[in-house]
Amino acid sequence: MEVTSLVVTHKKVSVEEMAKAWHGDCCEIIKRVLNGGMEECGLLYTCNRVEVYVVGKRCVEFLYEFAKEMGVCERIYDIYEGRECLRHILRVASGLESMIVGEDQILGQVRYFYNVCKKCGGIGEVLDLVFRKAIHVGTKVRRLTRINKGNVSIASAGIELLEREIGLRGKRVLLVGAGNMGTIIAKNIAKKVDLTIANRTYERGKRLAEEVGAKAIRFEEIEDFMGTCDVVIAATSANEPIITKEMIERSGIKVILDIGVPRNVEEAPGVKIYTIDDLRRISDENLRKRLDEVKKAERIIEEELKQLEASLRALRARRAISLMYRMAEEVKREEVMEAYHKLKAKYNLDSSVLDILNSFANSLIKKFLATPTNRLKLLASNDNLSAIKLFEFIFGGDSSVPDGEIEEIKKGEVKEACKGGGFKLR
């Protein structure tokens, strides 16, 4: 029941490599992972990360093979197991792993992909706990720290970059895209520039333009309008470039900000095209400004991580207890029926005696397993995962317990937990 993740982020790859690490839609990928033998699967895909979370057996080996099948180079990804995996998703939701430290969009993206993956059948008991905790922690960090104050989004960092490089006041700007990032940009620059908005769905672009006091044009008018602009900002989620090299050359535009993933703009000679990769410098400055808030956020994350691990141990203990009772129930059914047939043959009793036999067997099981049940819950609260694995192994679960772990169990907290009755370890 270990949680393991494969992670591709802005720390190792460019925008182009990021886009190549994602293939298909969520449901297709989840189906592929589950058919490959994993019990659960959760995904996260943003402009700065592609992450796959799995629960099952031999997760690391599976993710290596999965990455190979998906054509993802080993150089660009990391694999996190257990505690490191859990800490990572809490840091992601809190904005600590973002290019722009503290940015708010990532929390909504985690929530969005949690819901999508749940609808696609990838989220089970374990990842449900993990993702809900991540969303809770991300919200808590922003409430108790100032990690998200100031310019903390890709869109706002892009605007800051343009301000530094060319200055925006009074410029004629064409904004392509009226989604989340486009909306942030429009609201931040509309009062200082001559802004025109183009969107694939004209009505949506027109609504945003009316909201911020800008003009709107139709998508097919982009090339004609580019020739009248000082700056073009591309912020769409199109799967292929919407501004081609030929469009750039014919229009004569000299400055473009491309914050789309995949890239929205083709390269063209003699044109300055700023991309997400150019925002790394602003990210570094942003981090320096927020170091104190980062430390506060990390303390919150460590506290919540302990609670998440305790919840996962408790869940695993409940599953081990279920295995124990399931095995007892199977034995009970066989033995009750055998006793019934013997009583029927010897004393000619009818089937009404089955109720008495079942009642007796249920009472016996309940009393006999009460102490092991309570001990297992205690072991879970005492952070003894090895003991829980041993219980799973004993009662027919999938866990395999190496000899070294058994020795550790004998010497450790199991012995303490079993003092005072129930059963003894010699």
Image: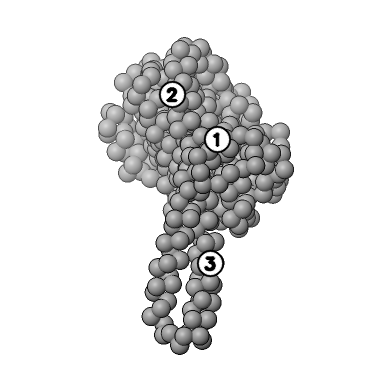
Compared to 142, does 223 lie above or below?
Answer: below
Measuring from the top left, give residue 322's x and y in whole percent: 49, 55
Q: What amino acid is found at the position of numbered circle 3 in the picture?
A: Glu
Label 2: which residue? 300
Dot placed on the residue nearer the N-terminal end, 1 or 2: 2
Measuring from the top left, give residue 242's x and y in whole percent: 52, 40
Q: Is residue 60 visible?
A: no
Measuring from the top left, give residue 189's x and y in whole percent: 36, 22
Contact between marks 1 and 2 (CB within 8 A): the answer is: no
The residues tagged by marks 1 and 2 sit, at their Cα atoms, a distance apart of: 31 Å
Quadrant where the C terminus sits is top right
Measuring from the top left, give residue 157's x and y in whole percent: 46, 21
Label 3: which residue? 330
Label 1: which residue? 416
Dot placed on the residue nearer the N-terminal end, 1 or 3: 3
Secondary element at image label 3: helix
Give left or right: position of 85 versus 162: right
Q: What amino acid is found at the position of numbered circle 1 in the picture?
A: Glu
Q: What amino acid is found at the position of numbered circle 2 in the picture?
A: Ile
